[in-house]
Amino acid sequence: MGARAQYVVVENGAWQRYFSHWAAGRVVDDLLPGPAAATRCFRARRKIDEWLDDVWCEGAALVDHDRRILLWFCFADSWADHRAARAVLARTWPGWDVRFAHDGMGDLTHHLGVGRDLTRAPGWFETFEPAEFAGRESTEPWSVVSLRLPDGSVRAWGSAWEPIDHLACGPALIDLLPTSPATPAPTDMPYGGVHFDPRARTVSLWAVRTVTGVHDWPLPGWDDWTLDFHGDDHTRQAAVLPADFPFPHLPLATALRRLGTGLGTPPPDLTPLLARATDAPAPAGTTPVLNPAALTAPEPADPAPAELARLRAALDALLAGAEVG
């Protein structure tokens, strides 16, 4: 196991892949100090000649110095953490086109001109017939689903599904929604949302995490529908939600402070964890196989003093300014 991460650095028309067995949770930390620090960090990792797939790769970044484009993805703990990271990167990567890779590894391989399916096995996108809608009573749903009814009004529900899961079951889900029990409005921002407009035959989707397959439209069952993908912009759905089901207004101050807490500190020492893992007995009838990469802890980004100062200045400006809201 592990939190595997892959990195690609493009420069002077050539690109090289790098790998870390444990650093997926540090992708944002390694990117925050800017392109020079991130590139040094990634080049300090192990060179590889293969791609991780969407199952095993939990975080990745592509730094294209030739076109000044950054593509990245990792698992965000919350909507606020994702938005705070985006706000800081916009300041510490000036002049760069900073994009969240919503299609996961597909966005990275597509950028390099080798297609989106390079890391995906045939039939990787699984569809299913919904028996019921996965609404949830919690005020912290995974996503929010809204539906425009025939009379023009809109209803909304909290959902325990990922945003893309609502599309994997096809338009049959729309028939289940009107009779689904009401759910409370969220008190925390969800990770994404889906809005269905059957009259316009339009699906709108946003997310702050990967929604692998979003660029393979039409997905099965949606041939005569249009997809409006809004990246991580929730405001389009917010504008159509009913008055009694609004998204909460959450300032980013707390998330920004979390980003600044560990600046300049190395990643945690994984030696004790690795020692316990290698000494653990294997289940009966099995033979343990140790991946040598698992014994190598991630190296810190180690930004230069000037890079760290610019990062702190960006955080301070965001905390003091209107962008915190």
Image (tube, grey):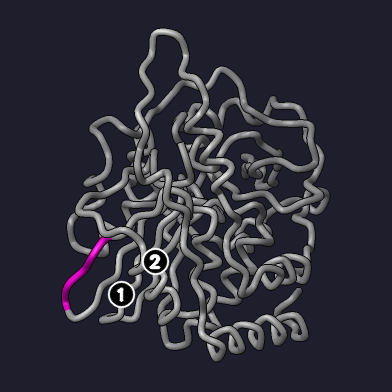
- Residue at label 1? 64
Q: Residue at x 43, y 63 (%)?
A: 72
For the record, the magenta segment spans 13-17
Residue at 55% across / 61% down in the picture?
232
For label 2, the residue is 71
Q: Which mark is residue 244?
A: none
Residue 182 visible in image: yes
Helix, strand or loop for the magenta stretch, by majority: strand
Tag count in the figure? 2
Seen in the picture, residue 121 relative to 246 is either above or below; the reply is above
Placement of 121 over or under 251, stated as above or below: above
Residue 226 visible = no
Q: Position of residue 91 (x, y in %)?
A: 55, 84
Which residue lies at the image location 51% right of the left edge and 79% below the top edge? Answer: 303
Q: Which of disc 2 and disc 1 is earlier in sequence?
A: 1
Q: Amino acid at mark 2?
A: Leu
Q: Position of residue 197 (x, y in %)?
A: 54, 46
In which image quadrant can residue 144 be found?
Answer: top right
CB within 8 Å, label 1 to label 2: yes
Left or right, 265 with reference to 290: right
Is 61 left, or right, of 25 in this rendering? left
Quadrant (top left/top right/bottom left/bottom right) for the C terminus: bottom right
User: Label 1 to label 2, Cα distance in Å?
Assistant: 8 Å
Three-letter code, disc 1: Asp
**Of all residues shown, which one is farthest toward the top?**
285
